[in-house]
Structure formats: C-alpha cells, structure tokens
Image (spheres, rainbow, N blue to C red):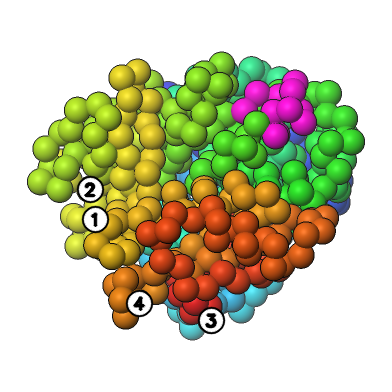
Amino acid sequence: MPSFPNSNFAARLVERLGENSALIESASGQTFQAAEIFGYIAGFASQFLSAGLRPDDRVVISCGVNPESSLPYLGAMYAGIVPVLLDERTHAASGDLICEKTHAKAAWSSKPVRWEWLRKKGFARFAGLCEPCSPDSVVSCSRKEEDLAALMPTSGSTGIPRLVMVSHRNLISNTEAIVRSQRLATDEKAMLIMPLSYCFGASVLHTHLFQGGGVVFDSRFMFPDKVLQAIDKYRCTTFAGVPAVFNILLRRSNLRSTELPCLRRFLQAGGALGPERVDELRRTIPGAEFFAMYGQTEATARISCLPAERLNEKLGSAGIPLDNVAVRVVDQEGHQLEEGHIGEIQVSGPSVCAGYFDEPAATQTKFCDGWLKTGDLGYRDKDGYIWIQGRSSDFIKIRGYRVGIAEVEARVGAVPGVCECAATGVQHPEAGEALVLFLVKEAGDEDGATSLLERVRQALPSQWTCTSIKIVPELPRTSNGKIARSQLQTFA
C-alpha cells in the first residue's frame, strides 16, 4: 500500500493495516479483510467529496455497534472531512440538533432516517455501505497535526454531551501511547461491544487496527453468553468494557464455564470496578491480564493505565500516566500538591484536545494554559500512581462532613448479595444532605430483600445519614453503559 507523508490519522491507520486484519460483526457474519477496508474507506471518501463536501466540512456519522459505521467515519477523515460522531440510539432525539449546531453538510446512518434539518437545507443524506473504490483512485487529504480530525461527544453521564474537538495529533499520540501501555501485538483481535461514539470504543478500534490487527463488533451484550461464544469463535485476544459489563459477566453469564483460550487481556475503563470484582474476574479467567484504565474524551481517550503486573500491589489505583502524558494534582488555588495529598487531577500532553466545539466559555473553564481540568479528585502515591477519590461534584455534605459518592458505592458494592450500587444525595432537614442508595441484587441471592437491606445498613458508618435504600432491577444508564446520575435524582 502507498505511503502517506502527512498527519492524517485515517491515512496513517490505513498504511498500517495488516494482511489479515478484519472487521467482523458476529451476529451477521460480515467480514472485511484489509484490502476491503481500504476500498470502503476510499469509497466513502469519494462519495462524500462527490456530494460537494470539502476538507473541514462536517458530516454526522450515526454510530452503532457494527463495522458499517467505522468505515464512513474513517472515510470522512481520510478525505479531510470532519466526522461528527453520534450514537444511533439517540439520534432520533438529537440528530437534527447536532446537525444544526455543527452546520453539518451531510449525515450517514446504517438505515435511512429523515434528518429534517439536512432535508430543509438540501444537504446529502447517506445510508448503508457505499461502493468500494480502488485504493489508488482516491488520495488522502494532507492534514497538519493540529487540524481538526473529529468531533466526539462526551459520555453524558452527568448531563448533555458536549462535542470535543479532537485533532489528528491527539489521535496519533494517544493511539501510539495506548498500544505501548497495553503491549499490543500485531496479531490482536478485539471484541468490541461499544459504539465508536464512545471514546473508549473508538480507542479500541484505533489501537487494534493501528497494530494491523482486527476488531469483532457484537451488539448482543443483552445476551452476554452469545458474546462470550463469539469471543471464542473469532479467537479474540482483547475484551473491553465498563464496570457494568464486568458485573454482568460475573453475575449473569456462564463466564465460569466458558473456555476462552485465546483471550489475553481485559480492558476496563468508564469508572472504577470494585477490587473484589477484579479479583474474582482474574480467578475466573486466569490466563487474561487485567488492565484498569482512566480517561476522558477531552484527553482523546486514555490518560493512565495500571500495568497488569502491578495489579496486586496497586489494586484500586487508576495506574500511571501514559508515557506522553503529564499529570499533576492541585489545590483550589491551583497550587501543585505533594504526593499523598488530595486535589484536582489535571492533565497535559499531546492527547489533550483543544476544547469544545462552539462553546468558548466551557472551553475556557475546562482547559487552561495547556492543562485539562478533569474535575476528578485524587492523589498520586510515592510511585506516581493515581488514586481517584471521586469527582468534585460527586461529594455530599452530611452533618458538615464531605462524603464521596465513589467511596459509598465501593463500600456498599462489597456487601454480599449486592451486584451493583449507585448513590446520590438529597436534602435533609437535620443532616443537610443524606444518602439515597439504589441496589441491584446478585442473581441467586436467597436471603431476601430484608436481609440484604440490613447488611447494607450495617456496612454504612453511623455518621452517614441514609434516608432510603431501594432495590431496583437495573440502574439507569447512559448509552455508553455509565450510571446516568442525572436520572438518579429523579428517582430519589
């Protein structure tokens, strides 16, 4: 394949595609080998350009958990056009708003949708796969490192997603650093159950294709055993998920009786998975390393990674910063703190993005002098490992004392019989604020709801005023699998 002497991330990725790399969606059996991937990327680039789009124009890509949406995403970037990623499960409500906000001149989805704003403007609407092109017929658009590569939505776990301006430099540097931190080989194949509109999902695609490996898309995680069977069938070496995914595997699947001889690693991000669950997972699949990671969309994807060989020693840590990322911890006045002292975690380096699209005030608040203010509170130990204590907004004051939501959820989540826990705060006439807990019971717990509630209350320190503990069939979640904290207040 030809060489690309520019910083276009999609062109760099295409250049590194291996001879055996493939995108496979296990439910439908679709397979795209390396040459086909390049042909479709070139085909989408040609399709967008033929419709009148030019470099730096924007096209909305409605992303599902399937290979189809990855191809127009990379095809647009290859042509210098900026893909705006949107979760297909939410586009009915926000698609037109995103199109209007970004002044998009086209949109793509796996199936035809109306896209009223585009229709009124007379702009292009695409659906499904394009006609592949000969790789030699479309030349990648030359891009500088600082040029905008994509607009990626934040997770939206605490509010309405913003669009982060991700540059080609951000993608290249973060992808290369993740590959090094996870020791990815050239024969890797990842099982991907997340859409590309989630930066975690996009980073799994980027890193595995960048190494010349493959990705298997499977949208059937509502039936976790089907995904486990696909991991084995397609000989996947990597499985990635948020905490809820691993809780489901441990409690609602046949993970313990499923052989996964090719699996080399678990990747976990999107919040903290309880240490007890990590230990249980490692005992269940001892042949797979476990990598706990920490990241934000505003830092492209990953900020830190806990090396698998340090897991026993540093269990519960978010790991050490990637090798091209600088991390500091500061107090409320912005002064850097020594090791062991809790403050806000801030990040700098080539993975940190330029800001939010068309939101200068929010950008100024979040990004300052090259540093990303994560909003996460934590500290670094003597070895440089990051320990996250919660978010600055995830604390409540009970009788004058600050109580971290993350600490509450970790403590309650360790109670026998609790599969998952989410906590929120409510106003209280005496305590100022008090806790409300939402629990998902473990499958097979025979002690009954009353006994479980008693165990939970006994696990809570006496000074933690708790007004209500509710057992629910499942926790409210965003489309990315994170707890939808804004909805908890409604239920409280």
The residue carrying mark 3 is: 116
Label 3 close to label 4 by CB (< 8 Å): no
Residue 423 seen in this snapshot: yes
Q: Position of residue 56 (x, y in %)?
A: 37, 52
Vertical side of 127 occupied by 130: above or below? above
Label 2 close to label 1 by CB (< 8 Å): yes
Residue 12 seen in this snapshot: no
Mark toward the viewer: 3 or 1: 1
**Which numbered tag is attached to residue 363?**
1
In primary-sequence order, the first of circles 2 and 4 is 2
The residue carrying mark 4 is: 428
Say which amino acid is labelled 4: His
Marks 3 and 2, how far apart at CA = 34 Å
**The magenta stretch spans which residues?**
280-290
Residue 386 falls in image quadrant = top left
Marks 2 and 1, how far apart at CA = 6 Å
In primary-sequence order, the first of circles 3 and 2 is 3
Marks 3 and 4, how far apart at CA = 46 Å
Q: Would residue 246 be found to the left or right of residue 210 on screen? A: right
Q: Is residue 287 magenta?
A: yes
Q: Which residue sits at x=41%, y=45%?
A: 296
Marks 1 and 4, how far apart at CA = 35 Å
Say which amino acid is labelled 1: Thr
Mark toward the viewer: 3 or 2: 2
